Image (cartoon, rainbow, N blue to C red):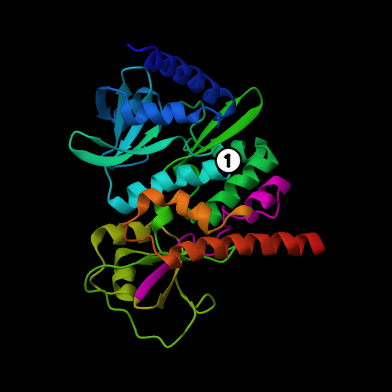
């Protein structure tokens, strides 16, 4: 083993110990990224099996994998579609650019002839899916860190948030949030700060009524209360795929609207939005003002060629950034 590889392995182990206590060290994170990209893989197994061994509640039915590396790192491998893979990596780069220690190092790698996102696995001692754990974390979190997480989610479009897509560490009186499963960033959405997002949902043969509105109908939507398969088929049409029917039935209630030839669904209906805060750390406001085309080009550089990466998508990030800054300015004046 060369001295460089040995040194990087030692540094990686030290960083993992550091992560479990206080979050990521941006000064040496590139060591972990290098290991994820190049270290030899010694074992690949089902992520569900590993989570069950740890006594965690398994919250996904997808084929995700737990990867063990020669020099000690563990990671989660997701062989998803290109948009989802690129979104996972972009979330890490966005977190890094904003100096938020939320998203673990994430890269794109080919494993067993499958290309996917590969994210550092972080061991945690609180399971947010256990009753009361998520509420405990929100109550005991540092106000600045919690606000930063909510702002990060909103600005970069992570509408699928909450206990299912987060890890929690609690140590020495400090609560640490680790934001995982960020693939939803790429989905098309319309989102007002303080509300839940309307997400585009399309499938083959969907019937979309013609509308004459020029802007998104935030104030002109329909609501389905107590959704059942029969109600969904009646309201949204008989061609709704079975997986969507199941998904819609878990939303009680949910709002929907038609716009630009698509169905747009507002998850959680009128429930309070998690990606919203009126607490604005000054350092975060300064970072938001630094977001520009150059920063976004860096964050999404690896996603060139992905379907979702359009100028409209990048403009929507800047628009959400501007909404947060406008809210900050209004609170400051008042």
Q: Which residues are magenta?
A: 262-289
> Above or below — where is 254 with respect to 168?
below
> Above or below — where is 252 with respect to 127?
below
SS class, disc 1:
loop
Residue 185 visible somewhere in the drawing: yes
Q: Does residue 293 appear to the left or right of 227 in the view shown?
A: right
Q: Does residue 131 appear to the left or right of 193 in the view shown?
A: left
Which residue is the extreme one toward the right? 334
Residue at position x 49%, y 43% from top? 163
Q: Position of residue 31 (x, y in %)?
A: 44, 26
Please identify the quadrant where the C terminus is shown. Answer: bottom right
The answer to which image quadrant residue 201 occupies is bottom left
Q: Which residue is mark 1?
A: 100
Q: Position of residue 121 (x, y in %)?
A: 41, 29
- Which of the pair 181/227 is nearer the observer? 181
Residue at position x 43%, y 66% from top? 311
Dot 1, crowdedness within 10 Å: few (<14), some or many (≥20)? some
């Amino acid at each position: 083993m060369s001295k460089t590889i040995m040194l990087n392995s030692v540094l990686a182990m030290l960083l993992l110990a550091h992560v479990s206590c206080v979050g990521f060290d941006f000064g040496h994170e590139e060591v972990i990224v290098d290991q994820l990209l190049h270290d030899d893989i010694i074992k690949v197994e089902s992520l569900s099996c590993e989570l069950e061994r740890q006594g965690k509640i398994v919250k996904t039915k997808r084929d995700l994998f737990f990867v063990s590396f020669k020099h000690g790192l563990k990671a989660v491998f997701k062989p998803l579609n290109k948009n989802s893979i690129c979104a996972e990596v972009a979330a890490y780069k966005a977190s890094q650019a904003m100096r938020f220690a939320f998203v673990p190092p994430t890269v794109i790698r080919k494993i067993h002839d499958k290309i996917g996102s590969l994210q550092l696995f972080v061991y945690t001692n609180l399971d947010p899916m256990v009753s009361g754990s998520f509420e405990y974390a929100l109550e005991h979190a540092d106000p600045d860190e919690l606000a930063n997480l909510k702002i990060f989610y909103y600005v970069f479009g992570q509408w699928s948030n909450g206990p299912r897509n987060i890890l929690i560490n609690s140590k020495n009186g400090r609560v640490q949030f680790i934001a995982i499963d960020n693939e939803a960033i790429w989905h098309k959405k319309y989102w007002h700060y303080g509300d839940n997002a309307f997400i585009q949902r399309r499938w083959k043969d969907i019937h979309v009524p013609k509308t004459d509105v020029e802007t998104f109908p935030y104030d002109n939507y329909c609501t389905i209360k107590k959704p059942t398969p029969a109600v969904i088929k009646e309201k949204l049409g008989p061609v709704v795929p079975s997986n969507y029917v199941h998904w819609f039935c878990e939303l009680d209630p949910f709002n929907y609207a038609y716009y630009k030839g698509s169905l747009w669904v507002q998850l959680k209906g009128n429930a309070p939005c998690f990606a919203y805060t009126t607490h604005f750390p000054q350092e975060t406001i300064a970072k938001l003002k630094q977001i520009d085309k150059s920063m976004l080009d860096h964050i999404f550089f690896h996603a060139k060629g992905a379907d979702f990466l359009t100028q409209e998508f990048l403009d929507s990030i800047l628009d959400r950034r501007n909404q947060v800054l406008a809210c900050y300015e209004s609170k400051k004046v008042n």
